[in-house]
Image (cartoon, grey):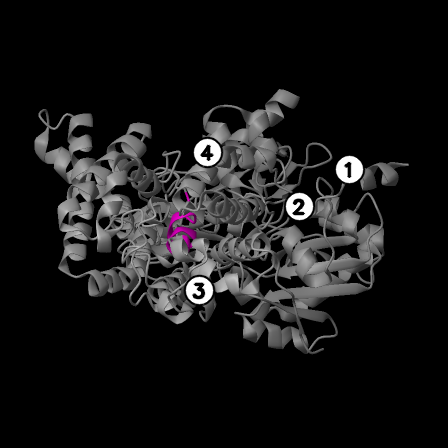
Amino acid sequence: MKAIKGKPFFRGVKLAGHKAPTENLPVERAEPRGDVAIPLRQHAGAPAEAIVAAGQHVMRGELIARAAGAVSANVHASVSGEVKAVEERADGRGGRCVHIVIAPDKVCEDAFLPPLSAPDAEAIVERIEACGIVGMGGAGFPAHVKLRPPVPVDTLIVNGAECEPYLTCDDVLMKHRSKEIVRGAKYMAKALGVNNIIVAIERNKPEAIALFEQTDLTVVALKKQYPMGAEKQLIYCCTGRKVPLGKLPAHAGVIVQNAGTAFAVCEAVERGKPLFERIVTVSGGGIASPKNLICPVGMPLSDLIDACGGVKDAVKFVAGGPMTGTALTGAESVVTKTTSGFLFLTREETNADAPTNCINCGKCADVCPMKLMPMQTEFYTNAKEYENADKYGGVLSCIECGACTYICPARRPLAQAIKTAKENLRRKKA
Amino acid sequence: MNLIVSSAPHIRSPRTTKHIMLDVLIALLPATAAGIVFFGWVAAVTIVLAMFTAVLTEFVWYIIEHKIWRNGKETLANFAAQFDFTSLVTGLLLALCCPASLEALYMPVLGAIFAIAVVKMLFGGTGKNIVNPAIAGRVFLFISFMAMVSYPEANFAPLLSYTDGALSTGATQLGNFLKGTATISDLDLFLGTGVAGCIGETCKLALLAGYVYLCVRGVIKWYLPLLYIGVCGLFSVALEGFDFSAFLPSVLSGGLFLGAMFMATDYVTSPKSKLGNIIYFVALGLLTAGLRKATGIEVVSFCILLMNFLVFLIDLAIKPRPFGFVRAKKTKEAKK
């Protein structure tokens, strides 16, 4: 079907794409040279619980940690080999969590689940749960939880907006695996009991749009605007519906799943393959040769750096996109299910100057897609008046897209102030 | 390896405060040039003096604040790094609302010192001032040197000549208009030819060019100055008993264009929210027209100064309404 033009959302910011270095590159497979360390917290919710012990041999795709609680996800071995340790490690993102360290044996034995043929709705959701599939856009919300919405829905949106600069992992996946994404989307639609499937792609990816136009799904060509890939904005641009404040997208009758998630669902249903590898974009001015790599979960960042020719002049390592990703403390971080990319940013790219006084220009409010007032939030947060920060700035509805901080001519850490206020308000409530 | 670790986002827009201030300076170039053409080299000297004094005042404040006698070179480098052109903008704006008079060259100097030292730096520098430094500097001079109005072609506060009853060469169109003896054509008022007044406020065409530049560069919202000018003009019309011939003279006279486009739009001293700004600019228009009628003198700078003090209250009255906001009533019904 011919692509429909998506409408723009309120405000937002225009970002330079920086996608050219990797958008037309093929996907290369990267193999870990040493051990892999698979973290047990790769998703939103509770960390998984390890069910293997040191010394045990595991096969690729074998369950090594079980979901703990309602919002959690299974974790599978991404290589076959011997478990060397189950230990707490720094995750390189400022936190610590239990990692299962596996020494690959180069034999690569697979332990996939049996393929499903013509599954019913419940079987699909159970398979997605068993395969540990989480939202691959970055937040990592367990996919099976989303597929059991509290209220009936009528639309499934496959999110291929990829509005973050630099990242091309969804773009290359959509270019090379469009058929699988369509089948995966149809499995999820079946699980939800909806007929209306929308594939949403930003207009800077014409090749992907053309490919999906050949399928029987509705394609929406979105305006290039940040944060287009944010759930609430995406739903508005595709369907014109507004998600009520404090409610789930399901309350607007919509479920949004990332294109990468749709691909993983297809693999899980048709091949019984659990989620243990993903495409990672390695880019930024500080890396010798930017690449799209398909990597096993748990592969150390240092191996990726070597595969891309090494780092030069980078002042900032980022896991994920430059707007919402996490700054890393070093090269000890590993690939997780939600790692869409690793960026190596130079000083010129980051523009990381010291903040100056707020000049009250209002640009942060002009770009806020949630129509908040970040300057007010920062003002009251600095005074530790968190209630007022929410009252005058609107803390709790913030989607943490970072547009305010990006645009601020005084380089003030607005998003950070909002997160601080949010955390303090949550603690007070609890 | 020394890595920067900070909260997201990790990229920043290249535009900083410096770029915005530079844009304002560029936008003021046509008005500055027009002022120099109309009022001669004295105007140029006034402008240079005001800008130089403004920067010098900030510099002196900085070296005292940072105790240059302890680590001299470092302080100098730091000053250069943190200098954001705001005092240049203040100096230029102040000069543009000074008279071009050889005898009154101390005025831009005193005004700039007052604007930078008392209004800006004393409150904490850029972004911390409560009122617009250039406006405060102008009002300071206005009150201190009322006698300056006796200089014919250099009326610092030209409209006072109307109250003096000395309607000679120095009277501006507004004075004439308010007295009901308009003598200068609207076109002359627009171009600033043969109109007395301050250096930068006479040529409306030049100010308009600067306004267009600011809008194109996204520095100001295009509708705000128009709101001020339009409301002021219409309210003047209403006060004259709906005499629509009063619209153009009241809009084109005095410092309304300069005030609406470059002074009232000052970020620091205007409200934060869009709605707040609309309230602020409409209030300015009403206040200016009303006070002009009541007092018979030019009051743009006084009105802006007055409204600057009310900005905090406007900000307190307005709360954001986020995307997806549902009215409290509606949710109650939904719950039922």
Residue nearer the viewer, A389 or B94: B94
Chain part drawn in magenta: B256-267
Helix, strand or loop at mark 1? helix
Q: CA distance from mark 4 to mark 3?
A: 48 Å
Mark 3 neighbour density, 10 Å: few (under 14) some (14–19) many (20 or more): some
Residue at (20% x, 42% y) in the render? B107
Amino acid of disc 2: Gly
Q: Which residue is mark 4?
A: B309
Question: Which residue is labeled 1 in the image?
Answer: B328
User: In the image, which disc is placed on residue A132?
Assistant: 2
Q: Tell me the mark number nearer the camera, choosing from 2 and 3.
A: 3
Tag nearer the camera, 4 or 3: 4
Front residue of this view, candidates A396 and B267 = B267
Amino acid type, callout 1: Ala
* Rendered location of residue A190, percent (x, y): 81, 59
At label 3, the amino acid type is Lys
Disc ID at residue A19: 3
Q: Is residue B95 left or right of residue A405?
A: left
- Identify the image quadrant of the N terminus of chain B: top left
Query: In terms of sequence position, does the residue under pointer 2 or pointer 3 come before the other?
Result: 3
Question: Where does the image place residue A135, in percent across and percent down from the top left?
Answer: 63, 49
Can you tell which mark lies on residue B188?
Answer: none
Outermost residue on the front side: it is: B165
Q: Nearer the viewer, residue A30 or A152?
A: A152
